[in-house]
Amino acid sequence: MPKPQPAQLPAAVWHTLHYEWLWVYRAPVPQCGVWSPEIPVPAGVFFVEQGEVRIQADGKEILVPRGHAFFSSPHLRRHWFAPGTRLLSVSLRSQWPDGTSLFRNALNFASAAPALHKATQQLFASIHGARKSVTYRQAIAASACSAIVWAAREAAFSAWFVVWLETLQQLGVQPVLQARASRRRVDQLVAWLQSLPPDHTIPSLPPGFPIGIRRAGQLLQQHLGIGLRTFMERRRVDLARERVMADRDTLKEIAFALGFRHASHFTAWFRRHTGVSPSAYRQSSAEQAA
């Protein structure tokens, strides 16, 4: 059966797609032989240049052997690295204006991808020059550059992005372009809920929103399988995970930002939802980033 042809859309539609690279690194993993905690990850791809990786995502476990790539959906996952594992990794953000990911949940699979591997090696060289190894922590560290260097890096990423899209097309993965009206309403609702301050629990919908709070809960239950209260609590947990992983603020500052009056209450709440304390989660996540 022939593969479906890519959708043809006006350039004005594609111009609304927001895409950017987040990091590019190449290095041995710092901790092997143990499962990471469940951590939020952006979209991206990593290549196993040495060793072996196991991924738990979407209720399944995926083996990524040496020489293969893992295409990651922006979601939660756990991973395990064999001793001596070395990765080449790119992470990116690609979203429509309503916050919908370009490939939604179509990723989270392993495959050989030699053309993309070569393009990723070229991207690494464009971003990091002659360096042979750059860790995750080094890759995400803030740094200053000139306008010319910034433009060159963006151009290099755009060239890589083309190969990434071509590779996914060859693997039979198509981008998510349009949703049904009910799905669009859910996407609009989710985008608005995600924009709220993190200490919100059950919000009142803004004036002029086309549905009421009861219908909002019904839509979330119908399309996502969870109610409004659970959605807001999971969102708060996801934000807590991201803030703890970022390693920029103290745990006390994160607790207050998330609406907790006492850091000890935040620690107990975080442990209840993740199984570990915020400090242990931060340390483990830093050691297991991929």
Image: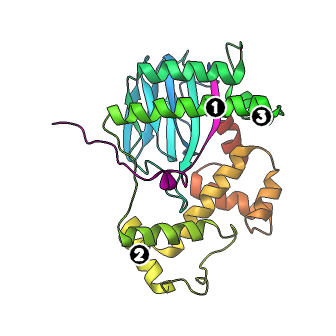
Q: Nearer the viewer, residue 95 or 192?
A: 95
Say if mark 2 contacts mark 1, CB within 8 Å: no
CA distance for labels 2 and 3: 40 Å
The residue positioned 71% from the left and 21% from the top of the image is 128
> The residue under label 2 is which amino acid type?
Leu
The residue positioned 63% from the left and 48% from the top of the image is 276
Residue picked out by circle 1: 155
Stretch of the chain drawn in magenta: 1-25
Quadrant in which the N terminus is drawn: top left
Judged by depth in the image, the label closer to the viewer, 3 or 1, is 1
Task: Give the mark nearest the N terminus, 2 or 3.
Answer: 3
Question: Could you tell whether 23 is left or right of 224 in the image?
Answer: right
Q: Quadrant of residue 19?
A: top right
The residue positioned 68% from the left and 16% from the top of the image is 133
Report x, y in % for residue 239.
Answer: 65, 57
Q: Nearer the viewer, residue 65 or 147?
A: 147
SS at badge 3: loop
Q: Can residue 290 be seen from the camera position used here?
A: no
Judged by depth in the image, the label closer to the viewer, 2 or 1, is 1
Residue picked out by circle 2: 219
Say if mark 3 contacts mark 1, CB within 8 Å: no
CA distance for labels 3 and 1: 21 Å
> The residue under label 3 is which amino acid type?
Ala
The question of residue 95 being in magenta is answered with: no
Q: Is residue 56 above or below residue 123?
A: below
Disc 2 packing (10 Å; few <14; some 14–19; many ≥20): many
Residue picked out by circle 3: 141
Report x, y in % for residue 38.
Answer: 54, 45
> The residue under label 1 is which amino acid type?
Ala
